[in-house]
Image: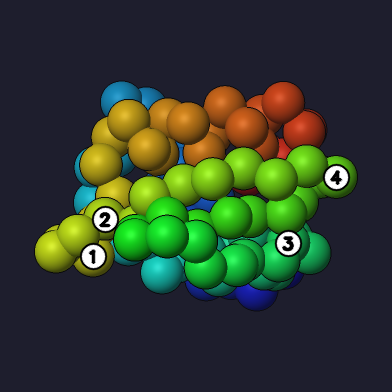
């Protein structure tokens, strides 16, 4: 995993929840972990990773991910034993 992806992972797991993680960095992390990102309707994307599909909403119009979405990503990664 590249250093950039490790930094993104550290931001996702930071306490308290960080509200300024760029969504593009989270998508890049999913891909680095072996995931596939597909476009859905509107601002939704599907992420196929860990043998399952999760649907997330890209933040609009700002590029930063809100705290709720960061917490959801962290929980999903923790469930699949991905930690910084």
- How far apart are the two marked residues, 2 and 3, measured between alpha carbons? 20 Å
Placement of 52 over or under 6, stated as above or below: above
Placement of 35 over or under 74, stated as above or below: below
- The secondary structure type at the circle numbered 4 is loop
- How far apart are the two marked residues, 1 and 4, measured between alpha carbons? 27 Å
Which residue is at a point 60% across and 67% down the rendered structure image?
38
Residue occupying the far right of the picture: 51
Q: Is residue 24 left or right of residue 33?
A: left
- The secondary structure type at the circle numbered 2 is loop
Q: x, y (%) of residue 33?
A: 74, 60
Placement of 56 over or under 74, stated as above or below: below
Kindly tell me whether residue 21 is visible in this rendering.
no
Q: Quadrant of the C terminus?
A: top right
Name the residue that disc number 4 marks.
Answer: 51
Name the residue that disc number 1 marks.
Answer: 63
Q: Are marks 1 and 2 in contact (CB under 8 Å)?
A: yes
Kindly tell me whether residue 32 is visible in this rendering.
yes
Q: x, y (%) of residue 14?
A: 41, 35
- Label 4 crowding class (10 Å Cα cut-off): few <14, some 14-19, many 20+? few
Q: x, y (%) of residue 80?
A: 77, 33
Q: Is residue 5 left or right of residue 33?
A: left
**Scheme of image coloration:** rainbow
- Lower position in the chain sequence, tag 3 or tag 4: 3
């Amino acid at each position: 995993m590249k250093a950039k992806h490790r930094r993104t992972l550290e931001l996702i797991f930071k306490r308290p929840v960080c509200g300024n993680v760029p969504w593009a960095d989270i998508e890049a992390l999913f891909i680095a972990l072996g995931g596939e990102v597909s476009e859905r309707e509107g601002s939704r994307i599907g992420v196929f990773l860990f043998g399952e599909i999760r649907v997330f909403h890209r933040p609009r119009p700002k590029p930063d991910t809100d705290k709720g979405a960061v917490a959801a990503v962290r929980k999903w990664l923790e469930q699949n034993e991905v930690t910084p």
